Image: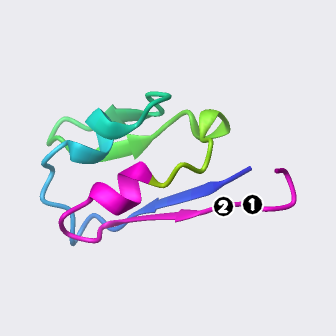
Amino acid sequence: MNKIVVNKSRCKRCGICIEFCPVKLYDKEIDGAPIPTRIEKCTGCMLCELRCPDFAVKVEVNKDEK
């Protein structure tokens, strides 16, 4: 399974990672921070990491599963 880490101190809660995720694996906290709640759906496309303007999202792809 892939691993997704959101650095909440860097995140400005813009929602870009949530909107760009093609499998909709994120939910929002009350303050708007992304929560990767359905990590098992992650395809490793890296869109959330690549689109994050604050470099707050890190995706670690498990290459053994691909």
Give the x, y percent position of residue 19. 27, 34
Residue placed farthest to the right in the image?
64
SS at badge 2: loop
Instruction: State whether residue 2 is above or below residue 23.
Output: below
Which residue: 79% across, 62% down? 63
29 or 18, nearer to the observer: 18
- Marks 1 and 2 sit apart, C-alpha to C-alpha, by 4 Å
Q: Amino acid at mark 2?
A: Val
Do the numbered discs 1 and 2 sit on residues whose CB atoms are within 8 Å? yes
Residue, disc 1: 62
Please give the residue where the numbered disc 2 appears in the rendered image. Answer: 61
Q: Position of residue 9 (x, y in %)?
A: 22, 71
Residue at image location 66% in from the left, 61% down from the top: 61
Percent from the top left, x then y, of residue 60? 60, 65
Query: Is 65 contained in the magenta span?
Result: yes
Q: Residue at x 30, y 46 (%)?
A: 17
Count of numbered circles in the view: 2
Q: Is residue 19 above or below residue 60?
A: above
Query: Is residue 62 rendered magenta in the image?
Result: yes
Tell me the magenta residue range: 47-66
Mark 2 crowd level (few <14, some 14–19, many ≥20, 10 Å Cα): some
Of 22 and 41, nearer the camera is 22
Q: Residues within 10 Å of mark 1 (few under 14, many from 20)?
A: few
Find residue 44 and report its horizontal and vertical position in percent.
60, 50
Residue 28 position by quadrant: top left
Where on the picture, by quarter, is residue 16? top left
Horizontally, residue 49 falls left or right of residue 19, namely right
